[in-house]
Amino acid sequence: MLKNLSLAVLSWLCGLTSLPADPQPLTRVHAHNDYEHTHPLFDALAHGFCSVEADIHLVDGKLLIAHDRSQVKPERTLEALYLKPLLERVKKNHGHVYLGGPEFTLLIDVKGSWQSTYPLLRDVLKEYSEILTSFRDGRKETNAIVAIITGDRSREMFRGEAVRYAAMDGELTDLNSNDSPELIPWISSDWSRNFKWRGSGTISPPEKLKVQQIVSRAHQQGRLVRFWGAPDQAVFWREMLADGVDLINTDDLEGAQKFFESADNHH
């Protein structure tokens, strides 16, 4: 009896050790060009990221993942690298990417023209509708993952759709539009085009105010703010947090995880 019990306990412990606990989900960071990491998606998930970015190219009827078209490989599809593993994970975690965790964002950067790429992208996303947030009649139906389209995109993409399986990444000029946050939930902008501060010393008061005004305006409209082309270091992340920026772009998964877990613990 004791022998059987110890074997049962041992197998139970082995089961536990083979499934490491999820990291703390980090909702303020975005894995920029995620597909360039050693293990696309999985490295970001191992560090608790709730937002990842994938660049897609339409090549021979497939949506292939790469920064430049010259780097595409036929087996590296949007489905193989992102959608299929996310589907498996959501099923395992009872409807969430992280067990009991928040909505996860898949930012899809369309390279080339949306006119040729989006129709296929929509068909592919529709196949994963069981895990994707959808939009019907202007209403958001939240699910495990929201797909947001950036890169070459336009409101025209969605014309005539009764159900959308993606939203659209906005730009600073969209803060002057009346579009709903269900259509444009994010505002993304090139930091280096709008600001001079590069992370050394402290940000100038006028630039700090400008960031805060952008954030305030976006939040009044129910949108999140993200800057790309920005310094990727702790001093910059700390300033963006202080100014209310919602999503911090980073390529440094481990450094960002340590920083944000520490920042959360100090609140």
Image (spheres, rainbow, N blue to C red):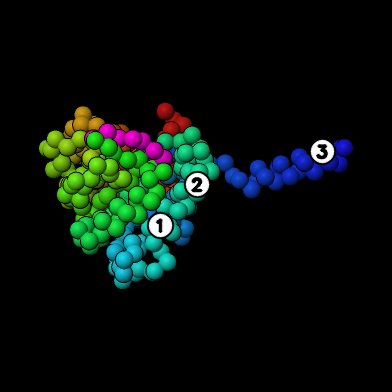
Q: Which residue is mark 1?
A: 79
Sequence-first disc among 3 and 1: 3
- Kindly identify the residue that appears in the image at 25 percent across and 55 percent down: 118
Quadrant assignment for the C terminus: top left
Q: Which residue is mark 2?
A: 89
Q: In the picture provided, is 242 more to the left or to the right than 27?
A: left
Mark 3 neighbour class, 10 Å CA radius: few under 14, some 14 to 19, many 20 or more: few
Q: Amino acid at mark 2?
A: Arg
Q: Is residue 93 above or below residue 154?
A: above
Q: Amino acid at mark 3?
A: Leu
- Kindly identify the residue that appears in the image at 25 percent across and 59 percent down: 117
Task: Check disc 2 and report its element: helix, strand or loop.
Answer: helix
Marks 3 and 1 sit apart, C-alpha to C-alpha, by: 43 Å
- Marks 1 and 3: in contact by CB < 8 Å? no
Q: Which mark is residue 5?
A: 3
Q: Is residue 68 above or below residue 92?
A: below
Judge depth for marks 3 and 1 and give the one in front.
1
Sequence-first disc among 2 and 3: 3
**Residue 50's x, y, as percent?**
41, 43
Quadrant assignment for the N terminus: top right
Q: Nearer the viewer, residue 233 or 21?
A: 21
Marks 2 and 3 sit apart, C-alpha to C-alpha, by: 31 Å
* Residue 161 quadrant: top left
Q: For the magenta stretch, what is the residue range?
A: 138-144
Q: Nearer the viewer, residue 63 or 246?
A: 63
**Residue 106's x, y, as percent?**
36, 48
Q: In the picture provided, is 228 more to the left or to the right than 85?
A: left
Q: Is residue 248 above or below residue 71?
A: above
Q: Nearer the viewer, residue 35 or 138?
A: 138
In the rendered image, residue 69 lying in the magenta stretch gets the answer no
Q: Amino acid at mark 1?
A: Glu
